[in-house]
Image (tube, grey):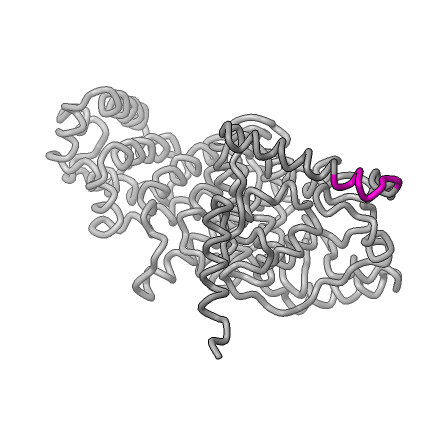
Amino acid sequence: MQILLRLAKLNELDDSLEKVSEFPVIVESLKCLCNIVFNSQMAQQLSLELNLAAKLCNLLRKCTDRKFINDIKCFDLRLLFLLSLLHTDIRSQLRYELQGLPLLTQVLESAFSIKWTDEYESAIDHNGPPLSPQETDCAIEALKALFNVTVDSWKVHKESDSHQFRVMAAVLRHCLLIVGPTEDKTEELHSNAVNLLSNVPVSCLDVLICPLTHEETAQEATTLDELPSNKTAEKETVLKNNTMVYNGMNMEAIHVLLSFMEKRIDKGSSYREGLTPVLSLLTECSRAHRNIRKFLKDQVLPPLRDVTNRPEVGSTVRNKLVRLMTHVDLGVKQIAAEFLFVLCKERVDSLLKYTGYGNAAGLLAARGLLAGGRGDNWYSEDEDTDTEEYKNAKPNINLITGHLEEPMPNPIDEMTEEQKEYEAMKLVNMLDKLSREELLKPMGLKPDGTITPLEEALNQYSVIEETSSDTD
């Protein structure tokens, strides 16, 4: 281990990296250390004793601004990732003692060649070249190491922490808006950026969107004026010079996250690992930031016009998410339902309009909202506007399936009162038999909206009536 540390220039006495001829030896030594640390518990313990994390950070500072030694940075970062993955103590050391958060953020800035135009805003060249393979690999390793360093960072206690997380979120916004050398590398890069954004305190995620500049505002006004007057719903979101604009805010990064989420849904596999992080991120962003929620609502749940098909039938983002609400994986269906619920401002009537009662029943039962109402979080009181097509179809929409059905003939219309009574008693006897044989259990709603056995629910309502009745 000591020989490899010396060959990798991790000895603190080595002050510079000037001899290019030594770079291949440094890279191969770092590769050896990665393999040994990953496979040997004794080597992992020695890494702690030899203070390897501090030596790696020192080496990283030497080569932060040296683009021609990307291989050294890449394997330095990979070894930092492995150490922080295998030892929780090293995570804390990196975060606080070694200032790993600003250091690794600077590595990302260097890999992306970021030029700042404001405190938390960088210049984006949409026509620029993609990242090189080496820069992409370095960025991916830095993102993975940062994930470990920030894994417990949901709560920010100091203003300096808040500033650092905002800078990192701004760098991640830049990451989402650039591409790698191949489509697969771009997806891997964006996937690691999404994972890291999930560790950023939600109060710092407002830097993912930014106000338009004066020039962009003028361009947006021109675009709005060019839209036909009857396209009022479409006037909220415009696309100008590759910039997604909503309500005077640049929504490019949020649009990339939405597209990334849809691609993961279309893959049809590994939903828990691949889909839930981005869904969870979009849910928290929507819950905390009004402009993000309104933009996503506009993209995912636009005003209903055609309600002839069930909500889960079709190829829109809304159809795909509604299908996930009944997925076999409990975690997947919960986060998909939660995302749509937040977009509907946690109002049950609004959610049912877009999903139908059948698809939403699981979420409503878990939240104690089967009887209606809304969630615990507060949202703005701006009202949804229904289209004329939806208003005309609403009386004939099946609330369970959420789509338009032709009126069906009532089978009991032609029955006599005796026949109706006979069929009713027959149904009661069948249900009673199933209940006594414990093939089903009749359930009822408690006053708080949660499900409970029917007898218990009736007893609770009886107690409430007795306590609220006038004793006089």
Please tell me whether residue 88 is drawn above or below residue 397 in the rendered image: above
Is residue 124 visible in this depiction of the protein? Answer: no
Image quadrant assignment for residue 187: top right
Q: Position of residue 157 (x, y in %)?
A: 30, 63
Residue 371 appears in the rendering: yes
Residue at 71% x, 62% y is 384
- Residue 348, percent across and down? 62, 55
* The quarter of the displayed image where residue 64 is located: top left
Residue in view at x 21 percent, y 46 percent: 93
Query: Observer-nearest residue: 268 or 123?
Result: 268
Find the residue positioned furthest to the left.
49
Q: Position of residue 337 (x, y in %)?
A: 57, 45
Q: Residue at x 38, y 39 (%)?
A: 142
Specify the segment rendered in magenta: 414-421
Location of the N terminus by quadrant is: top left
Q: Is residue 25 left or right of residue 127?
A: left
Q: Is 77 or 255 nearer to us in this picture?
A: 255
- Answer with left or right where residue 250 lies relative to residue 277: right
Instruction: Please tell me which residue lies in front, 244 or 266.
Output: 266
Say whether residue 283 is magenta.
no
Estimate the x, y position of residue 213 in percent, counting from the top left.
63, 66
Q: On the picture, is 59 further left or further right than 165? A: left
Judged left or right of residue 242, residue 45 is left
